[in-house]
Image: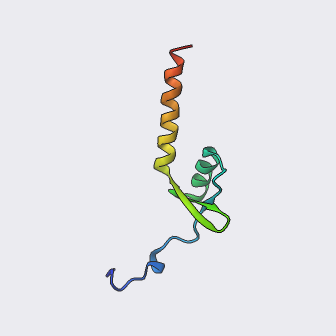
Amino acid sequence: MAPDKVNVGDIMSSPLITISPDASIREAMSLMIEKDVRRLYIMEGKEVVGRVTQTHLFQSNFDLMMSLSGLAGTL
């Protein structure tokens, strides 16, 4: 496709898969799996206020596991 001939609307993803900023990481991961998407857009009312990706969630879980493994040695 020639970039000067294609509108972004022709290649965009739709509909956006959204989630509340109050949702848990578990909810976000489940929604990504259910909808087979790599990104969720965070909505407050009708406004997009952020985005979370599979990479963000993986990093968050990895950091948590590393923290917990450090605690295991202190118990």
Q: Nearer the viewer, residue 56 or 29?
A: 56
Please give the name of the residue rendered at 57% of the width and 61% of the height, measured from the top-left corner: 49
Q: Residue at x 66, y 50 (%)?
A: 23
Image height of 47 relative to 38, above or below = below
In the shown orientation, is residue 44 left or right of residue 5? right
The x, y position of residue 28, in whole percent, is: 60, 50
The C terminus appears in which quarter of the rendering?
A: top right
Quarter of the figure with residue 14: bottom right
Residue 68, percent across and down? Answer: 53, 26
Q: Position of residue 64 (x, y in %)?
A: 53, 33
Q: Is residue 40 visible?
A: no
Residue found 31% across the figure and 82% down from its top: 2
Which residue is at the far bottom?
5
Tell me how many marks there are.
0
Q: Position of residue 35 (x, y in %)?
A: 59, 59
Looking at this view, name the residue that lies furthest to the top: 75
Colour scheme of the picture: rainbow
Q: Please state if 30 lies on the left or on the right of 67 as rendered.
A: right
Vertical placement of residue 63 versus 35, above or below? above
Tell me which residue sits at (63%, 53%) in the image.
21
Determine if residue 2 is in view. Answer: yes
> In what quadrant of the picture does the N terminus appear?
bottom left
